[in-house]
């Protein structure tokens, strides 16, 4: 830093962020007043989602650095808007900054968020800035709006539906979890192409998140074909060091941030032939009326399995 330059205080920092936060059409007023003022388009409904990330739990600031944390904090929220097939609009960010490096961390967070915000047309319209002697905590609240087709819920799956995921799963803890690729465009393209019955983003793990769809859809079940589940190369790497199989990683690891959705069989056929350009789709199984989750091996044998995703409040 230029020694003649005064270190930034809270208001200097907010001013720094404000100068770097462009506004798009829906933002009447961004950073600078007591509230942001937004104008959603037409008769769209607002979608609201929030996620808090804590140093030591969701990331390690020391090794990840603040840009990656900012990217992830906005990315996980974008993934939730994708999971409703919505369009993201604007975000507000609350931070508890470690006092000793507060300003440089806040600037790094902002840079990580701004890159992603630009790509997805999101305005950074406000926040709250605090410093303390504890670890970094960041909470992002993202607003979005529904398309004219409305949102896609978890609760619309039906027996006989085909289950899809949008990409390879497992092993994200190897590093990928810091760089979620929000599937906004994919969700909107799918929503446009066919009626999506149920949709969720895979944050807790395929078994847990598909479990949420099945439970919300009046207690249904599923049969997944073990050979058709796309396994990420990171899952093979992780498997070498911990003895759990690559398939187990793909089924149960969290933070893949791919989409999982169900559609009627005729719409599944429509999605696959010819496939939508630039969309990676993997048909992994079928929804059943019977409420358990089963895995079908290549020889046709069925094994029941339980959802195993991450649960913050599970007792050890
Ligand atoms: P108030 O005390 O009225 O809540 P603040 O002084 O906290 O206002 O914030 C002033 C302005 O700066 C507001 O528009 C607020 O949304 C914005 N702001 C504060 N912190 C951040 C941040 N970390 N990122 C983006 N905007 C922020
Ligand atoms: Mg105020």
Image (tube, helix red, strand yellow):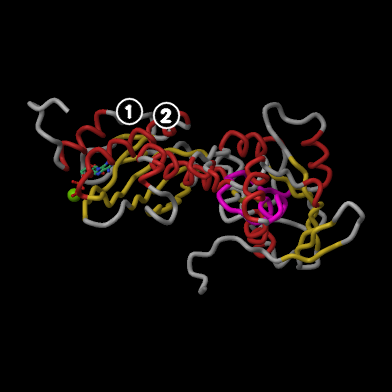
Q: Assess whether residue 260 is covered by the magenta stretch.
A: yes
Residue furthest toward the front? 241
Based on the displayed image, in which of its 4 quarters is residue 70 positioned? top left
* x and y percentages locating residue 58 in the rendered image: 44, 52
Q: Is residue 8 left or right of residue 79?
A: left
What residue appears at the point 72 percent right and 56 percent down from the top-left corner? 157
Based on the displayed image, in which of its 4 quarters is residue 67 positioned? top left
Q: Dot 1, crowdedness within 10 Å: few (<14), some or many (≥20)?
A: some
Residue 84 visible in the snapshot: no
Q: How many marks?
A: 2
Q: Please tell me the numbered disc located at residue 39.
A: none
Foreground: 243 or 8? 243
The local secondary structure at tag 1 comes to: loop
Residue 310 visible in the snapshot: yes
Quadrant field for ligand 1 = top left
Range of the magenta residues?
A: 244-262
Q: Are marks 1 and 2 in contact (CB under 8 Å)?
A: yes
Q: Please tell me the numbered disc located at residue 118.
A: 2
Q: Is residue 189 left or right of residue 43?
A: right
Q: Residue beneath label 1, please?
A: 22
Front of the two marks 1 and 2: 2
The local secondary structure at tag 2 comes to: helix
Foreground: 171 or 304? 171
What residue appears at the point 82 percent right and 55 percent down from the top-left corner? 160
What residue appears at the point 58 percent right and 33 percent down from the top-left corner? 185
* x and y percentages locating residue 114 in the rendered image: 37, 32
- Which quadrant of the rendered structure holds the N terminus? top left
Q: Dot 2, crowdedness within 10 Å: few (<14), some or many (≥20)?
A: few
Q: Is residue 222 left or right of residue 65?
A: right
* x and y percentages locating residue 229 in the rendered image: 75, 47
* x and y percentages locating residue 37 in the rendered image: 31, 41
What residue appears at the point 70 percent right and 50 percent down from the top-left corner? 246
């Amino acid at each position: 830093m230029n020694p003649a330059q005064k270190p930034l205080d809270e208001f200097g920092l907010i001013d720094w962020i404000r100068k770097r936060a462009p506004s798009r059409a829906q933002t009447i007023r961004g950073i600078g007043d007591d509230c942001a003022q937004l104008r959603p388009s037409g008769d769209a409904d607002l979608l609201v989602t929030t996620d808090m990330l804590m140093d030591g739990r969701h990331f390690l600031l020391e090794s990840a650095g603040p840009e990656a944390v900012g990217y992830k904090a906005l990315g996980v929220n974008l993934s939730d808007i994708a999971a409703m097939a919505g369009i993201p609009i604007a975000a507000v960010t609350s931070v508890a900054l470690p006092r000793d490096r507060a300003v440089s961390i806040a600037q790094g967070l902002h840079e990580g968020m701004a890159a992603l915000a630009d790509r997805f047309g999101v305005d950074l319209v406000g926040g709250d800035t605090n410093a303390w002697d504890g670890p970094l905590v960041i909470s992002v609240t993202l607003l979005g709006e529904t398309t004219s087709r409305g949102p896609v819920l978890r609760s619309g799956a039906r027996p006989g539906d085909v289950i899809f995921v949008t990409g390879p799963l497992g092993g994200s803890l190897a590093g990928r979890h810091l760089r979620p690729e929000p599937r906004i465009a994919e969700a909107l393209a799918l929503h446009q192409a066919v009626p999506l019955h149920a949709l969720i983003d895979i944050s807790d793990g395929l078994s847990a998140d598909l479990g949420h769809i099945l439970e919300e859809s009046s207690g249904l079940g599923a049969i997944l074909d073990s050979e058709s589940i796309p396994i990420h190369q990171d899952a093979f790497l992780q498997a070498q060091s911990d003895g759990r199989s690559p398939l187990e990683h793909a089924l149960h690891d969290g933070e893949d941030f791919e989409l999982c959705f169900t559609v009627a069989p005729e719409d599944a056929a429509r999605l696959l032939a010819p496939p939508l350009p630039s969309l990676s789709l993997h048909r992994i199984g079928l929804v059943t009326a019977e409420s358990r989750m089963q895995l079908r091996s290549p020889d046709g044998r069925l094994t029941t399995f339980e959802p195993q995703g991450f649960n913050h409040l599970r007792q050890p």
